[in-house]
Amino acid sequence: MVFQARVARVLAALALALATAACGSRADDRDEPKSAPRPAAAAESSGAAPAAAAANRPRIVVLGDSLTAGLGLAARDAYPALLQQRVDSSGLNFEVINAGVSGDTSAGGLERLDWALQGDVRILVVALGGNDALRALPPEELQRNLAQIIERAQARGIAVVLAGMEAPPNFGRDYIVSFHNVYPALAKQYHVAFVPFLLQGVAGNDSLNQRDGVHPTDAGARIVADTVWAALKPLAEGQKRTGS
């Protein structure tokens, strides 16, 4: 009961943040270009090595929305850039590509998947769904889009990390449960590495979020990076051991 109450408080805080930020964040999202940046630009924005120097490095692509893009943060503080630091400090030879686009839904991520998977991509981190929840899009639609992303990546021999998201409680229990269940069901169906909640330890904490209450501060982004790294590191190390 204590755990359930704690989860409810966190989700309630997230719901309030989403509600108060909805107008502003949607306006900001509409101002964001919907065309994906060129791969070289994405590498630079993630804090990775310049494209020319990293041309022969296999890639880890992080496909997401503004949480991934690092809205409100310096490029070096977005969590994909922090993942690059962890990759480098672990002696792993990967270039982390920040393929986050503000305002993207799961449908938007699917539409630009072919661009995101350009180059020698070995691992795909899928961190989508926050905007689906904000817009109360059907969980069935979310599941179809994410399933297609995973299937298309796996068809290319790319390992996948799926990061979950939660729906705000003001949409009702049925929607919350249906939305929540999408992620573990897909992780089980496709046997992919799984992060149950991308914002674990960050959502609902004022000190770890920007003034909009939605996007992490640099300290919050470090926690997000730690959360993703826990699932990503074994895959990256496994590829190093096999030499694939």
Image (cartoon, helix red, strand yellow):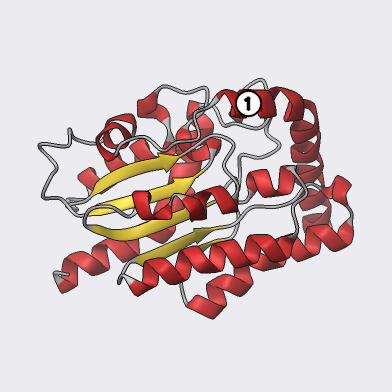
Left or right of 49 on screen, residue 16: right
> Number of numbered discs present?
1
The percent coordinates of residue 161 (x first, y second) are: 44, 61
Q: Is residue 183 visible?
A: no
State which quarter of the image contains the C terminus: bottom left
Instruction: Report whether residue 32 is seen.
Output: yes
Give above or below for 183 relative to 30: below
Which residue is at the front of the view, 66 or 2? 66
Quadrant of the drawing holding the N terminus: bottom right
Residue drawn 40% across the image and 52% down it: 229
- Type of amino acid at the residue the image marks with label 1: Ser
Residue 112 in picture, x, y percent from top left? 44, 49
Q: Nearer the viewer, residue 151 or 87?
A: 151
In this view of the protein, which residue sits in the foreground, 227 or 215? 215
User: Which element is circle 1 on?
Assistant: helix
From the top left corner, tell me how far across and down residue 22 is, in percent.
75, 30
Tell whether 18 sits left or right of 111: right
How crowded is the residue under tag 1: few (<14 C-alpha within 10 Å), some, or many (20+)?
few
From the viewer's perspective, is residue 158 above or below residue 41? below
Residue 237: image quadrant is: bottom left
Provide the residue designation for mark 1: 207
What residue do we see at 82% from left, 42% from top?
A: 12
Question: Residue placed at 30% from the left, 72% from the top?
Answer: 157
Q: Residue at x 78, y 46 (%)?
A: 168
Q: Position of residue 153 (x, y in %)?
A: 38, 66
* Residue 116 sits above or below residue 25 on the image: below
